[in-house]
Image: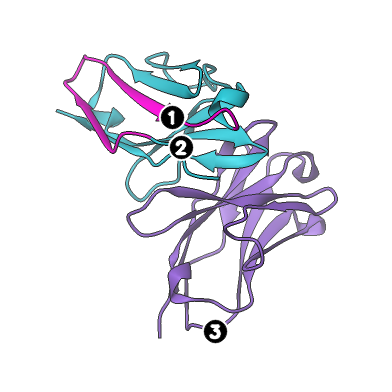
Chain colours: A cyan, B purple
Amino acid sequence: QSALTQPPSASGSPGHSVTISCTGTSSDVGGYDYVSWFQQHPGKAPKLIIYDVNKRPSGVPDRFSGSKSGNTASLTVSGLQAEDEADYYCSSYAGGNVFGTGTKVTVL
Amino acid sequence: EVQLVQSGPEVKKPGESLRISCRGSGYTFTNNWITWVRQMPGKGLEWMGWIDPSDSYTNYSPSFHGHVTFSVDKSITTAYLQWSSLKASDTAVYYCARRVETYFDYWGQGTLVTVSS
């Protein structure tokens, strides 16, 4: 399976919003409501922030939200904070699993 | 508290074998599959496959099938990732993570494997 396509970078000012897209195919993103999103700070393990398209694990702020339309999923981070600066990866079930190419979010 | 604790960094030569570990605690180890993920230096996450600790059923990504082996020892709630002949291109950080139905909720801290002559 090919990696899901994400923009290499995204940025926003503190307090503003940023949206990251994740494009796959009907065999992964479009075929299942099983898209997850992970946040990874430098030198750290990934952290689950969204699962099953739009569900948040306990402890994840509601500033993080997910959605999906067709073969494209999206992650929106509202009210950007300095600590949101990190790499973000989408992931989809596809029989096995496939990750996105990753997006570096910069807080200006 | 659910924890996945991985073994420490490794430095190996090409052609050598290696086994790294991932010990689960704070939950019933056989209830959740363990997945392995590679992250090469400065690159993104790559799914390698997963293993069901209850019966050692495995599903490997085609990209890794035949080059790595997953195993578990239920008695010590530990999963393993093994290579029989390392290559320089295996240099990466390897993560284990717990699979809950359709997603990975807890991750190990990662194991850095360096393969260099």
Identify the residue shown where x is 70% and y is 31%.
B101
- Of marks 1 and 3, the one in the foreground: 1
Q: CA distance from mark 2 to mark 3?
A: 32 Å
Q: Decide: marks 2, 1 in contact (CB < 8 A)?
A: yes
User: Residue A92 in magenta?
Assistant: no
Looking at the picture, does residue A53 appear above or below residue A5? above
Relative to the observer, which residue lies in front, B39 or B108? Answer: B39
Residue position for label 3: B15
Q: CA distance from mark 1 to mark 3?
A: 38 Å
The outermost residue toward the right is B55
Point out residue A42 in the picture as x, y percentages from the top left corner.
32, 47
Looking at the picture, does residue A64 appear above or below residue B11? above
Locate residue A22 relative to residue B22 in the image: left or right: left
Residue type at numbered disc 1: Thr
Residue position for label 1: A23
The local crowd at label 2, few if under 14, some if 14 to 19, many if 20 or more residues have their Cα within 10 Å, is many
Identify the residue shown where x is 69% and y is 57%.
B79
Determine whether the residue tagged by mark 3 lies in a helix, strand or loop.
loop
Residue type at numbered disc 2: Leu
The local crowd at label 3, few if under 14, some if 14 to 19, many if 20 or more residues have their Cα within 10 Å, is some
Residue position for label 2: A4
Point out residue B57 in the picture as x, y percentages from the top left corner.
80, 51
Subunit of mark 2?
A: A
